[in-house]
Amino acid sequence: MVLRALDRLIDTTPPRLRGRDPYWRPTPPPCSKSVREPAWSWRRPNGLEPLDLTGGVTVLDANAAYLAAASTVEVAHGRLINTKGREFDPRVPGYWHVEIFPWLVPDIVSPLGTAKYPDLAWLTTPTVALLARLVDDGYWPEIHVTDSWTSVDRCRLRHWSEMISGIRREALLSGDRDAVESVKLAYSQAITTMGIDKKSMIHRPDWSQHIRTQHAANMWRKMWSARGSGLPVLGSSAVDEIVTTSSAVRWCLDNAAKGGRPPLRIDPTGLALGSFKVKKTLNAEEWSARESG
């Protein structure tokens, strides 16, 4: 099966606004090449209070997380314009040049990831929206915008994401692993291509960056929610894995079976977008060896 995901976006599910197609190839703002996207390969520091790992450690992998992000993130329908030091608005897609502060919560990775940042950095709306929520909760000092490129008109790629998700669902239910991998490759390449290929039918670096940073924000919020529920976060890598204790996974499954809404939704079938499946389990010794290695 060959799925041409970008063709489907243009021909079948264009994100129209007031009856108009979006700008498929506007000139990107000069700051687009400087935008920072949160990424991490993080492990809980050894110096913190020891955790009981006698029940084992579980590595969870997110199911179709980029599709989940693409279905919810708002992107610019038209081109981005320079709106200078306007006040941050989480409803407005675009780029924001903001002040960066140290992250002071040691038992969870920074929402900006593990890379070093300058004092001022260009971030997307999904990333700044996450920081703004942390300001409200007292974990981030402030959002100070020194410059911005934003769009008044916004849209979502929800119909495209739903269409691709439907094809993926059929492949999963059929048990055809090759078809599942083909769908994953198709939408992953589409998100990458729209961001870097100037000869592509769609050249929207801002869309690509908004999808990826929405995914990063979604993953970090799940870790933060797990931490808030008393579930330990032992690590996270490749921005689509979360490591926790096996007892925490069992608690999430039991909670869901009773009608609750656990912070980590476990779906072994892989059908639910943004949920998790178990990638591997380790005993305490194996985890310690992995840590020291």
Image (cartoon, rainbow, N blue to C red):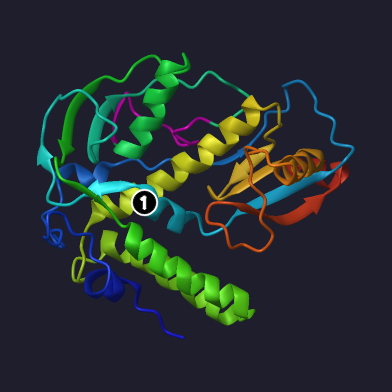
Residue at image coords 23%, 75%: 11
Image coordinates of residue 130 in percent, x first then y, are 41, 31
Q: Residue at x 20, y 62 (%)?
A: 203
Query: Residue shown at 19%/42% (left/top)?
Result: 31
Residue 81 lies, with reference to residue 169, above or below; the image says: above
Q: Quadrant of residue 214?
A: top left
For disc 1, the neighbor class at 10 Å (few under 14, some 14 to 19, many from 20) is many
User: Which is more toward the observer, 266 or 113?
Assistant: 266
Residue 101 vertical position relative to residue 34 in the rendered view, above or below: above
Q: Which residues are magenta?
A: 110-123
Q: Residue at x 50, y 71 (%)?
A: 168
| Quadrant into which the C terminus falls | top right
Q: Is residue 141 left or right of residue 104?
A: left
Residue 287 position within the rendered picture, expressed as x and y whole percent measured from the top left? 79, 44
Depth check: 119 or 273 in front?
A: 273
Seen as rendered, the residue at the extreme front is 259
Pointer 1 residue: 211
